[in-house]
Image: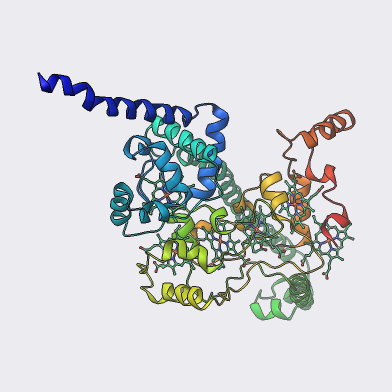
Amino acid sequence: MTDLLSLPARTLPLIIFFFVASFVSNGQEIPSEPAAISAGETLFNNNCRACHRVHEKLIGPPLAGVTQRAPSIEWIISFVKNSAAVIASGDEYANALFNEYNKTQMTAFSTFSDEDILNILAYVEAEAAKGPATAAPTPAEGAPAAAGEEGVPAAYLNLILVGMVVILVLLLIILVFLISAVKRFLDQKDLTPEQREVVHAPFTLGSILRSRGFIFIVVFVVASLGFKAVINGLYSIGIQQGYAPAQPIAFSHKIHAGQYQIDCNYCHTGVMTSKNANIPSANICMNCHNQIKQGTLTGETEIAKIVRAYETNTPIEWVRVHNLPDLAYFNHAQHVNVGGVECQTCHGPIETMDVVRQHSLLTMGWCIDCHRTTELNTRGNAYYDRLVELHSKTSEGAMKVMDNGGLDCSKCHY
Ligand code: HEC
Ligand code: HEC
Ligand code: HEC
Ligand code: HEC
Ligand code: HEC
Ligand code: HEC
């Protein structure tokens, strides 16, 4: 009897707790609109992707299912804003996780609003619902097309070469026949002994080498090759294509951007917003390397150099690879952000390079060629709408960069 009576008394606080809890989490609902998901995707790619994937474990745990796993949405929000504070508060779940991940400190995102974090969670849930990605279909689709494009001309080229060789051999045979026919004809004529000698002159190597025609051809070929070499030499002054200097730390894009797929923006922070891409300072490296102290290839020596630079506050003296002369102006944000040009179009397959190599020529001709052939990326950019309309009235075809002043000297020269 007493038990029955005390039941409501014991459950009441629980009911109130659930009521309050559901009220609070109602205030922090994960959005599901496409706009929120796409905002979340951008935030995720720029800030979280370096350490998290939706489905796989990387530096941090896979984020799929985190909303069910973690204590609450509020907990996630405060953890993302400042994980160190949540861990220091003695929170059990946070401490277990922290230990499981070898005490790797997650970056604090104190400037993020609650909405930002909810958007990221919306993106994570949308991705999680799709399930783990199956093997990337893009390369498989691209491969046969590429093979087809390259395979056909190569086969034609071989065919043409074989055809030309056959024709040359036939010509040679015809010539030999002609010569012997002419000789036989002349033999039947009355010739002086000198004339006879000329007709039957042996066709030796020596006589060819001494002939005036041959000497002229040799001199001509040597002179043209020399001239071409000098011109090429002059043109290549100041061109550093292929330049790949050794760096003070054996940093590898193949490991970081390739194997671990860390986003370029995570380290080259200026690329979307400013002229310069920026080379990361040691504290960005330390986000990961205060935990990862051993590389599989270079052991601990290379990473110890980062720690030393960080602790003594001395900048790492990276050797600059790409460098335009001071007279030229180049802006990354204009190309990457506004123009939507991929890093790889200009820098080549950086994510496969252990040592960065200058992939493109970086000459004025290189800039101009691309501005002549590349269409302006005007989609969804109201700034360009009127321009495109005017362009379509006066000219045919899509609007190229050059139609927007991409060939004006003053756009590229100070
Ligand atoms: C420098 C690497 C790093 C970055 C960048 C990072 N995280 Fe983390 N994150 C971790 C690690 C490591 C953990 C595991 C907990 C720990 O060690 O503190 C973690 C844990 C979490 C957890 C808890 C996961 C669970 O299983 O309960 C959430 C949620 C989370 N991160 C969200 C984010 C979000 C959102 C971002 C981007 C805004 C982000 N993280 C960026 C490293 C990172
Ligand atoms: C983990 C940090 C990190 C990531 C991720 C990263 N980079 Fe780098 N990058 C560096 C560092 C450090 C240097 C300077 C040392 C060197 O040249 O190797 C550098 C140098 C470069 C350079 C040459 C700069 C010069 O001196 O001219 C280019 C180009 C470059 N990165 C492009 C990329 C691209 C493209 C990506 C994405 C596919 C990328 N990086 C991802 C850290 C990073
Ligand atoms: C987002 C995490 C992350 C960041 C940021 C990061 N690294 Fe790494 N780094 C890794 C991982 C993961 C490995 C692979 C360790 C291994 O080989 O198992 C690694 C390996 C290395 C190695 C050793 C390579 C080898 O195998 O011997 C060097 C050197 C290195 N990093 C330098 C740097 C430098 C310099 C920076 C800053 C410009 C940097 N890293 C930033 C995650 C990171
Ligand atoms: C349209 C061609 C082009 C594209 C696209 C491009 N770059 Fe560059 N990048 C250059 C040129 C040219 C330089 C040399 C700039 C200079 O010397 O002023 C350069 C220099 C750099 C440098 C050296 C440091 C600096 O800021 O000058 C880094 C790092 C870099 N790029 C990274 C990137 C990354 C990461 C991306 C993609 C997000 C990218 N670049 C996209 C052409 C390009
Ligand atoms: C791979 C192609 C490509 C290369 C190479 C390239 N650009 Fe561009 N450039 C573009 C595109 C695309 C735009 C248009 C961006 C936009 O939508 O406004 C652009 C725009 C510009 C603009 C702004 C033009 C305007 O009308 O406002 C300048 C300046 C510029 N580029 C300078 C350079 C310089 C300097 C180089 C060589 C060092 C270079 N670009 C190499 C593709 C390229
Ligand atoms: C799309 C960008 C772009 C435009 C437009 C452009 N230039 Fe250039 N120019 C460059 C770059 C980049 C270099 C440096 C190339 C190098 O170092 O090889 C250069 C180099 C030069 C040089 C050589 C300087 C030297 O010391 O070698 C001259 C001269 C020059 N430009 C004149 C012009 C004139 C005149 C125009 C207008 C008709 C013009 N440029 C338009 C990008 C441009």
Q: Position of residue 15 (x, y in %)?
A: 30, 25
Foreground residue among 138 and 169 = 138
Q: Quadrant of residue 65?
A: top left
- Work out whether residue 113 or residue 382 is closer to the camera in this orientation and state it: 113
* 227 in relation to 32, above or below: below
Q: Residue at x 52, y 49 (%)?
A: 47
Q: Hey, which quadrant is residue 133 in on the image?
A: top left
Image location of residue 271, percent across then percent down:
64, 54
Q: How many marks?
A: 0
Q: Is residue 17 above or below residue 8?
A: below
Q: Is residue 179 left or right of residue 288?
A: right
Residue 407 seen in render: yes
Write the residue at 50% across / 73% down: 310
Check the picture and name the quadrant holding the N terminus: top left
Q: Give whichever of 160, 62 is nearer the camera.
A: 62
Residue 77: image x %, image y %?
Answer: 45, 42
Single out the residue that lies furthest toward the right: 394
Instruction: Name the colouring of the figure.
Output: rainbow
Quarter of the rendering occupied by the C terminus: bottom right
Q: Position of residue 303 (x, y in %)?
A: 42, 72
Residue pictured at 64% horizontal, 77% vertical: 204
Q: Quadrant of ligand 3?
A: bottom left
Note whether residue 133 is visible: no
Report the residue at 52% width, 45% height from top.
45
Up-down relation of residue 383 to residue 196 (above or below): above
